[in-house]
Amino acid sequence: MQNLSQRVAYGDMLVEMGKENESIVVLEADLGKSTMSIFFQEQFPDRFFEMGIAEANMISTAAGLSLTGKIPFASSFAVFATGRPYDQIRTSVCIPNLNVKICGSSAGLSDFGDGSTHQSVDDITLMRVLPNMHVFSPVDAIETRKILRAMLEIEGPCYIRVNRNDLPILTEDDQEPYRPGEVRLINKPGDITLIATGVMVSKGLEAAEKLAAEGISLGVYNLSTIKPINKKSLLEALAGSKALITAEEHSVIGGMGSAILETLSGDLNIPVSMIGINDQFGTSGQNYDELLNYYGLTASAIAEAARKLAAK
């Protein structure tokens, strides 16, 4: 299974779209060599704005640029892109419903070496609670490119969270456009349904393989639009399922799992198990897998949840 970088996909796609649309401008908060927005700077230096370590100013400037007809893409580490300028995102972007696109790079625990101050376990919660905001969490580099194209076509605020590490390619590099809100089947339906986002989709596939040898069928779905979610697509994914597992590299409070349960309130009558970060901050680690293991974001954790549900 090939692994590719979502960050490189982000930078490459900005350049590709920038060649097609001169209205696209890019803003950066001193992390362009990490978010890969530097690719755009190299190609279009007159349409690139280095804002320094001043995320609030970056978002305010992006809002102003959008009022002139520009389409701004503003990026930084996810924890800084959402937390530091939250008031500006709320007041200057979401309330007036402006066409500003925000990229939260090195999302979740993927910046494993820098600890809790640089790890975003709450960015989905912060962004999806805002009216008018669209929230995306791609599963791989290919889907990152497709989501960016979809974000360009959406007239209004958008947020995408991007992983720092190379992730397995699980989607097709075809001409089919990304359809926001839909749940996409990755393997095949099972008695138990797993709906996951980001890196946890690949962990789900590993779990499904383990469980199949035990006679437990786990259907693995990718949900990369956290807001808005297509309720009809969710219900179709769960048709005939005996239990649901949600899995995300994010706090279980207000994350993807919460979004699913809110969407299905009153329509769900099967047991649910939620896998995520349990009301904790991040911490430093020697590598990414060490942190995923520490917080229980593993194939083994998904398999164990499925076994407990199957036993019921």
Image: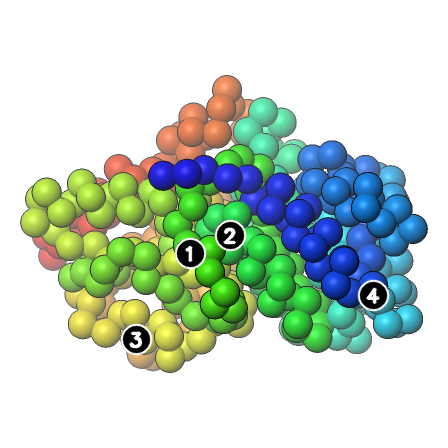
- Badge 3: how crowded within 10 Å, few (<14), some, or many (20+)? few
Q: Which tag, 2 or 3, sits closer to the chain's start?
A: 2
Measure the C-alpha gap from mark 2 to mark 3: 25 Å
Measure the C-alpha gap from mark 4 to mark 3: 39 Å
Measure the C-alpha gap from mark 3 to mark 1: 21 Å
- Badge 2: how crowded within 10 Å, few (<14), some, or many (20+)? many
Question: Residue 134, located in which quarter of the rendered image?
Answer: bottom right
The circle on residue 142 is 2
| Residue labelled with disc 3 | 236
User: What SS does tag 3 mark?
Assistant: helix
Q: Which tag, 4 or 1, sits closer to the chain's start?
A: 4
Label 1 amino acid? Glu
The circle on residue 172 is 1
| Residue labelled with disc 4 | 23
Residue 187 image offset from top left, x and y in percent = 27, 56
User: What SS does tag 4 mark?
Assistant: loop
Residue 110 image offset from top left, x and y in percent = 54, 36
Label 3 amino acid? Glu
Left or right of 219 on screen, residue 134: right
| Foreground disc of the pair 2, 3 | 2
